[in-house]
Image (cartoon, rainbow, N blue to C red):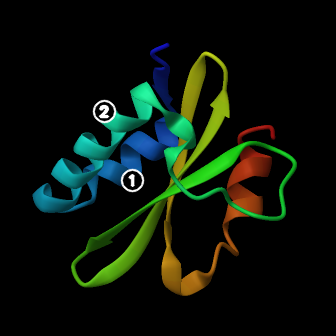
Amino acid sequence: MNYTLVPTEFFLKQIDELSKEARSIIEKRLELIKINPFRNKRVEGYSLFLFRIRFEDNKKEKRVIYLVDKPKVILLCILDRSKEYKDLKKYLKSLGY
């Protein structure tokens, strides 16, 4: 079963700000998510099926956060790892989750 990727507007704004290298890494990983979105580590502490993709941009650790809602995968946001997911609740609330 192939999943459909649905990016939020906020995610699209964030990805435009990344370097070309980081965008190409994310694009490759998103192709794998279409096949199996459960391949990455789950984000703990939420009742939603939230997962993350690790990557690096300009020597900073970042995470793509996505929600699996069969048959869709909703690309929510990109977080700085240094903030330890503190902004995630705010992003989820603004998106209605």
Q: Residue 31, which numbered label?
A: 2
Q: Residue at x 49, y 13 (%)?
A: 1
Residue 15 x/y as whole percent: 33, 50
Residue 92 x/y as whole percent: 74, 49
**10 above or below 14?**
above
Quadrant occupied by the C terminus:
top right
Indicate the amino acid at tag 2: Glu
Q: Residue at x 28, y 58 (%)?
A: 17
Number of callouts in the render? 2
Q: Which residue is mark 1?
A: 14
Q: Earlier in the sequence, mark 2 or mark 1?
A: 1
Indicate the amino acid at tag 1: Gln
Residue 57 x/y as whole percent: 26, 72
* Mark 2 nearby-residue class (10 Å; few <14, some 14–19, many ≥20): some
- Secondary structure under tag 2 reads helix
88 or 46, nearer to the observer: 46
Residue 58 x/y as whole percent: 21, 79
Determine the CA span between mark 2 and mark 1.
19 Å
Q: Mark 2, mark 1: which one is toward the viewer?
A: 2
**69 above or below 12?**
above
Q: Residue 78, which numbered label?
A: none
Task: Evaluate if marks 2 and 1 touch, with contact meaning CB atoms under 8 Å apart.
Answer: no
